[in-house]
Image (cartoon, rainbow, N blue to C red):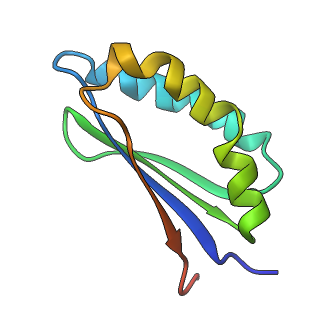
Amino acid sequence: MSVDRGLLALLEAKPGKGDELAAFLQQGRELAVAEEGTVTWYAFKISDTTYGIFDTFEGEDGRQAHLNGQIPAALGQVGPDLLAADPDIRTVDVLAVK
């Protein structure tokens, strides 16, 4: 199999909460490592308040397992304190990989 699915989540931190959101995302790496169906997992910063996550999967089963896993659950718990708005989560089809 090859990587053919992804998720892009854009996160907007509340004013003054960017560093806490960044720390939360850094801690999320360990949860992503434990997910068998997640091929790659990236957490990134666009600005002091805008952050994101990009993951890739080999098929829909891996993506669904991730969506039903610990990272989204943890984000749901800290979201009201850290996020200015609900996460913008988009499913994507991966067209090419190097």
Q: Nearer the viewer, residue 92 or 33?
A: 92
Q: Is residue 85 above or below residue 58?
A: above
Query: Across the whole image, how many numbered discs are drawn on residues?
Result: 0
Among the 4 quarters of the image, the one containing residue 13 = top left
Percent across and percent down for residue 67 are 64, 46
Q: Nearer the viewer, residue 48 or 78?
A: 78
Question: What residue lies at 57% left-to-right and 65% top-to-bottom?
Answer: 6
Q: Nearer the viewer, residue 81 or 42?
A: 81
Question: What residue lies at 75% left-to-right and 80% top-to-bottom?
Answer: 2
Question: What residue lies at 38% left-to-right and 25% top-to-bottom?
Answer: 21
Q: In the picture provided, is 27 more to the left or to the right than 30?
A: left
Q: Is residue 7 above or below residue 15?
A: below
Among the 4 quarters of the image, the one containing residue 61 = bottom right
- Farthest residue in the bottom direction? 96
Q: Is residue 60 above or below residue 67?
A: below
Percent across and percent down for residue 97 are 58, 82
- Farthest residue in the left direction? 15
Q: In the picture provided, is 41 more to the left or to the right than 10?
A: right
Percent across and percent down for residue 78 are 46, 17
Q: Is residue 9 above or below residue 70?
A: below
Among the 4 quarters of the image, the one containing residue 94 = bottom right
Q: In the picture provided, is 78 more to the left or to the right than 68?
A: left
Question: What residue lies at 68% left-to-right and 41% top-to-bottom?
Answer: 32
- Quadrant where the N terminus lies? bottom right
- Quadrant where the C terminus lies? bottom right
Percent across and percent down for residue 91 are 50, 63
